[in-house]
Each structure stands twice: as structure tokens, then as C-alpha cells.
Amino acid sequence: MNNLEKVVFSRTLERADWPESRIARGDVVEEEAALKEEFDGEILARGGFRLAQALVAHDLVDELHLYVFPVAQGQGTSIFAGLARPRVYRLVSSTLFPSGVVRRVLPRAETGDL
């Protein structure tokens, strides 16, 4: 991971100290479009709620890796809240970890795949 190029979306960090890292401060949608032009191949996005929600809302996610934790908090906001139209994904794998966490891998599907 240290040798891979990384882009950190942040409005508060002054510098990125991890090797091969740079900071993106602009609009998430514009920055993501620029990354797709710059890089050939897969772009992995890991981050917080706001980043995930923005990428999903703007239809920039080809595959979800959702981690379901065995905790009910009774509050929170969905990364899918406020979508202009439904997004369709299909489950291709599910992994149960000893902690009870479940990872689900869901690539984007065509609406006819339901």
C-alpha cells in the first residue's frame, strides 16, 4: 500500500505525510472525474460517511464492499439517503468474520438483473 498512489479528500489537512499521497480539496464529484481521467484501472475509495454518500449519490460507485457490524445504535444516516433514483447492486459474496462482522461485495447491476 505504501507504494500505491493515494488521494486524500480533506478540507482540513495541511499535508499528507504517507508516501505517494496527495490531498484533494475540491468538489468530490469533480475530483473523482479527474481521477478517472488520470488513472487507468480500478480506483478504491475508503473513507467516511460523507465521501461514501457523495460517491453513491453521484453514481460513481461500480462496486460496494459493505461491512455490517452486529450493533444496533438506533440512529444514524444511511449512505443511500436522498438518492434521486434507485441504485441496483447484486450480491456476489458474503464473508462472516469471527467478530460477527459480515462483509458483502455488491457490484453494480443492470436494472434487468433483479
Image (cartoon, grey):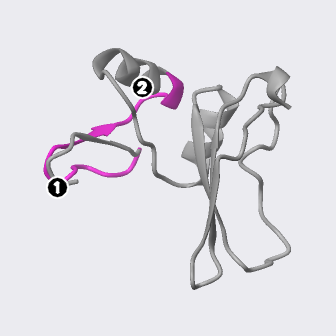
Secondary element type, mark 2: helix
Q: Is residue 7 above or below residue 113?
A: below
Residue nearest the viewer, comparing 97 with 72: 97
Specify the principal SS of the magenta part: loop
The amino acid type, in three-letter code, at marker 2 is Glu
Q: Residues within 10 Å of mark 2 (few under 14, many from 20)?
A: some
Q: Quadrant of the N terminus?
A: bottom left
Residue nearest the viewer, comparing 42 with 79: 42
Left or right, 20 with reference to 83 = left
Residue nearest the viewer, comparing 22 with 101: 101
Residue 41 drawn at (x, y percent):
35, 26
Query: Residue at coordinates 42% horizontally, 25% vertically from top-left?
Result: 31
Q: Farthest residue in the top direction?
A: 37
Q: Which mark is residue 17?
A: 1
Residue 4 drawn at (x, y percent):
20, 44
Query: Residue at coordinates 30% horizontally, 23% vertically from top-left?
Result: 39
The amino acid type, in three-letter code, at marker 1 is Asp
Which segment did they paint magenta? 11-29
Quadrant in which residue 101 is drawn: bottom right
Marks 2 and 1: in contact by CB < 8 Å?
no
Q: Is residue 15 magenta?
A: yes
Q: Is residue 74 above or below residue 38?
A: below
Left or right, 93 with reference to 87 = left
The residue beneath circle 2 is 31
Query: Residue at coordinates 69% horizontally, 32% vertically from top-left?
Result: 57
Q: Is residue 67 above or below residue 111?
A: below
Q: Is residue 73 above or below residue 18?
A: below
Residue 85 drawn at (x, y percent):
84, 25
Left or right, 42 with reference to 51 = left
